[in-house]
Amino acid sequence: MENSKLLYIECLNNDKYLKELITDSYKWRFALENSNIGVWDWNAKTNEVFYSEESKQMIGYEDYEIGNTSDEWDKRVHPEDREAYYRDFNAHLRGELDIYINEHRIRCKDGSYTWILDRGKVVSKDNDGKPTRIIGTHSNITKRKEVEEALKINLDLITNQNDRLHNFTHIVSHNLRTHVGNFESILEFYDQASSENEKEDMVNHLKTISKSLTETITDLNSIISIKSKSDTKALNQRVNLRDVAKKVVESLVLDIKKHNVLIENLIPETIYLNTNVSYLNSVVHNLISNSIKYSSKTRQPLITLNCDVTINTIQLTVKDNGIGIDLNKHEDKIFQLYQTFHGTQREDSKGIGLYITKTQVEALGGTIEVDSTPNQGTCFKVTLNT
């Protein structure tokens, strides 16, 4: 009789325990279904994995369409994310990480990718300390990733605009200082002129520089309206490259005479391109004036302008026989702001011109490269789309 009572009590206890398990199971199921979290349970000995229905639904599959091997998930991980995916998981298995956490893209049934936050932890080990069971969760974090990407794009845009504002300040200072310097030089030459003819020449030069200054101010006003690199296309015009170079040379006539520089404009008259004229003028101006500034004092300075044409591009070259740059020392600094490479040889150098030039070339969608040898000369190559 006592045994019967004990059996009855035990049955009641078991029944109560089963009911609690069922109740807890429903609670967990409800929690999972309403939290968009999937569960996985990996048996390391058999390589069998239980994937909850929620995990499968996250990637567009029905419960019966996904098998129970680890490869079912692994093979769907985005190729670019697999290395980190395996690295983090194996690091946890080796005990290097307390918890396995990884974010990766998983290929859905429709071919699209969903971002998953994958978490897991070893819950049992064998006598040798090797993991035998790992339990984890899947969370869909696609919306969070989209917000992060949007924030990144906005941050990049703000950074770009700040850089452009900073760059514009230096463009104004650099370009206007050049014209002011020209005015001062002409007035000095005017005071030193010994005949009326020389004075008349200086007045004509003043008119040329004044016209160039007016054009520069107009161009700078155009630059203000450019909000991003892609917007440079809004100001594109069809221009003749030889004419652009010719006008730049005319604006630098005093510096050219002062340094006794020979200019060879070998650009064919038939070369046209659609581009932002203000940027192109500034690029050509800076490269030629840079060659003049660093011309050699031991030989006849020569600057050669030329170009190579392909189906889609034009490569403008500005080559000189000046003092050159030691690329072994300065190659990574040439286009950086406030970088100079000739010590006190050229005290008027501010280290701005090449920085501005590179920024403008890139705004035009082009590239710029340099080849230089000390005491032999420098060649800049600007490649632009036609």
Image (tube, grey):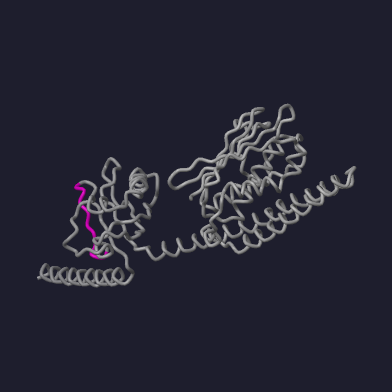
Q: Position of residue 160 (x, y in %)?
A: 57, 57
Q: Magenta segment, which residues?
A: 46-54
230 versus 297 height, above or below: below
Viewer-nearest residue: 249 or 167: 249
- 235 vs 376, left or right, is left
Q: Residue at x 58, y 39 (%)?
A: 266
43 versus 153 height, above or below: above
Question: Total marks drawn?
Answer: 0
- Residue 267, located in which quarter of the rendered image? top right
- Residue 16, located in which quarter of the rendered image? bottom left
Q: Residue at x 29, y 52 (%)?
A: 134
Outermost front residue: 197
205 versus 149 height, above or below: above
Q: Quadrant of the N terminus?
A: bottom left
Q: Position of residue 87 (x, y in %)?
A: 36, 45
- 240 vs 295, left or right, is left
Q: Is residue 27 magenta?
A: no
Q: Residue at x 28, y 72 (%)?
A: 30
- 227 vs 302, left or right, is left
Q: Position of residue 260 (x, y in %)?
A: 74, 35
- Residue 65, located in which quarter of the rendered image? bottom left
159 versus 11 height, above or below: above
